[in-house]
Image (spheres, helix red, strand yellow):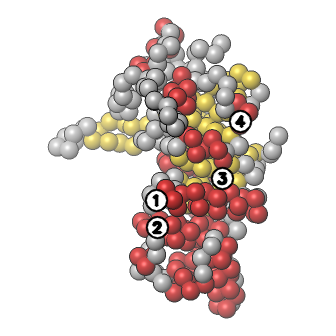
């Protein structure tokens, strides 16, 4: 069992949302609702679920790019949510994001050299200009880009090259933990495999811990050590690789069934659409769509419980 690097305890984040463009009334939307999650040192933890279920918000909370409404985030034995901004600065170099859209996350007015140099300047690393440039050239080569790329602007690169620059920016501070938020979804299929292989090679070489956020369960199952499944702001299942073919939460089962296979007709196993996140149902949030719901599902919120070692499910079907 690997030691825990990052831990979230009862983490929640809400937003006030207008019910109508012309209305002054606002309702509370719980993007993340009571999440408990441990990320182990050196692992690749996949976080999957439908669009809008809170995956990206959870990733941003773990990096403290957003402040939680309640709950705690622990880095080893340090409670990050109690630290002041100045105290967080030294920790931030060890935790870096890779965003979904590399074109939106790279400053169009800066050259690649300026983009990669900025984190070094912010954290006061390598004050000698020549050493910084050598570091930039080395990190570009590590992600498969030639040194001449440092003198161009983001719009002069392809989507795959821009994502490699985004990966280089995350790596230049030599982090221990990276949140990769759907890093391949904005890329052509032919380029996606290259980026995934690059991330895996980097993990092997540097021992980096990943939270890999995706809506693509088939891809995540190929590369992840563990998978956490999210639905409407809650973690409903966490499983290790050996449990990928076990009995699952009905929602996870539906996700597995929806994975296309050559020559296989995919049939929907879950009826309807997710409920309105501004007015969630009582009890299990999945029960309106669940084909196996029981009376207790409409009354009580199921808690994550360990059904076999390393396999946690939040479902009343598992007693």
Rounded to the nearest angstrom, the CA distance separating label 2 from label 1 is 8 Å
From the top left corner, tell me how far across and down residue 135 is, in percent. Answer: 68, 81
Point out the frontmost of discs 2 and 1. 1
Q: Name which of mark 1 and mark 4 comes first in the sequence.
A: 1
At a point 48% along the width and 8% down the height, the residue shown is 295
Q: Secondary structure at mark 3?
A: strand
Mark 1 lies on residue: 188
Q: Quadrant of the C terminus?
A: top right
Point out the frontmost of discs 1 and 3. 1
Q: Answer whether residue 100 is visible to the viewer in this image.
A: no
Rounded to the nearest angstrom, the CA distance separating label 2 from label 4 is 32 Å
Mark 3 lies on residue: 210
Q: Secondary structure at mark 2?
A: helix
Mark 2 lies on residue: 159
The quarter holding residue 31 reads top left
Q: Name which of mark 2 and mark 4 comes first in the sequence.
A: 2
Question: Quick check: 264 left or right of 8?
Answer: left
Question: Quick check: 239 left or right of 269?
Answer: right
Q: Name which of mark 2 and mark 1 comes first in the sequence.
A: 2
Rounded to the nearest angstrom, the CA distance separating label 1 from label 4 is 29 Å
Point out the frontmost of discs 3 and 4. 4
Q: Residues within 10 Å of mark 3 (few under 14, many from 20)?
A: many
Q: Name which of mark 2 and mark 3 comes first in the sequence.
A: 2
The quarter holding residue 315 reads top right
Mark 4 lies on residue: 240
Is there a contact, CB below 8 Å, between mark 1 and mark 4? no
At a point 77% along the width and 27% down the height, the residue shown is 309
Is there a contact, CB below 8 Å, between mark 2 and mark 1? yes
Is there a contact, CB below 8 Å, between mark 3 and mark 4? no
């Amino acid at each position: 069992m690997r030691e825990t690097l990052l831990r979230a305890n009862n983490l929640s984040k809400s937003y006030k949302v207008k019910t109508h463009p012309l209305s002054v009334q606002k309702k509370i939307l719980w993007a993340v609702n009571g999440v408990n999650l441990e990320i182990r040192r050196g692992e690749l933890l996949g976080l999957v679920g439908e669009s809008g279920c809170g995956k990206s918000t959870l990733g941003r909370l773990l990096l403290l790019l957003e402040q939680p409404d309640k709950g705690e985030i622990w880095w080893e034995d340090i409670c990050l949510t109690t630290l002041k901004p100045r105290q967080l600065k030294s920790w931030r170099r060890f935790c870096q994001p890779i965003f979904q859209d590399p074109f939106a996350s790279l400053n169009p007015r800066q050259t690649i050299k300026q983009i990669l140099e900025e984190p070094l300047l912010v954290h006061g690393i390598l004050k000698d200009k020549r050493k910084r440039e050598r570091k930039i050239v080395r990190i570009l080569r590590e992600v498969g880009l030639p040194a001449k790329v440092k003198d161009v602007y983001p719009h002069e690169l392809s989507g795959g090259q821009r994502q490699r620059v985004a990966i280089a920016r995350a790596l230049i501070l030599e982090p221990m933990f990276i949140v990769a938020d759907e890093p391949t979804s904005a890329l052509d299929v032919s380029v996606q495999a290259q980026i995934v292989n690059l991330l895996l090679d980097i993990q092997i070489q540097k021992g980096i811990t990943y939270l890999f956020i995706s809506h693509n369960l088939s891809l995540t199952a190929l590369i992840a050590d563990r998978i956490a499944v999210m639905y409407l702001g809650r973690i409903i299942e966490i499983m290790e690789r050996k449990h990928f073919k076990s009995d699952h939460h009905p929602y996870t089962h539906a996700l597995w069934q929806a994975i296309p296979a050559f020559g296989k007709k995919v049939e929907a196993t879950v009826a309807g659409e997710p409920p309105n996140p501004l007015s969630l149902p009582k009890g299990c949030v999945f029960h309106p769509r669940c084909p196996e719901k029981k009376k207790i599902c409409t009354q009580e919120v199921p808690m994550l419980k360990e059904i076999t070692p390393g396999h946690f499910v939040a479902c009343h079907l598992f007693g």
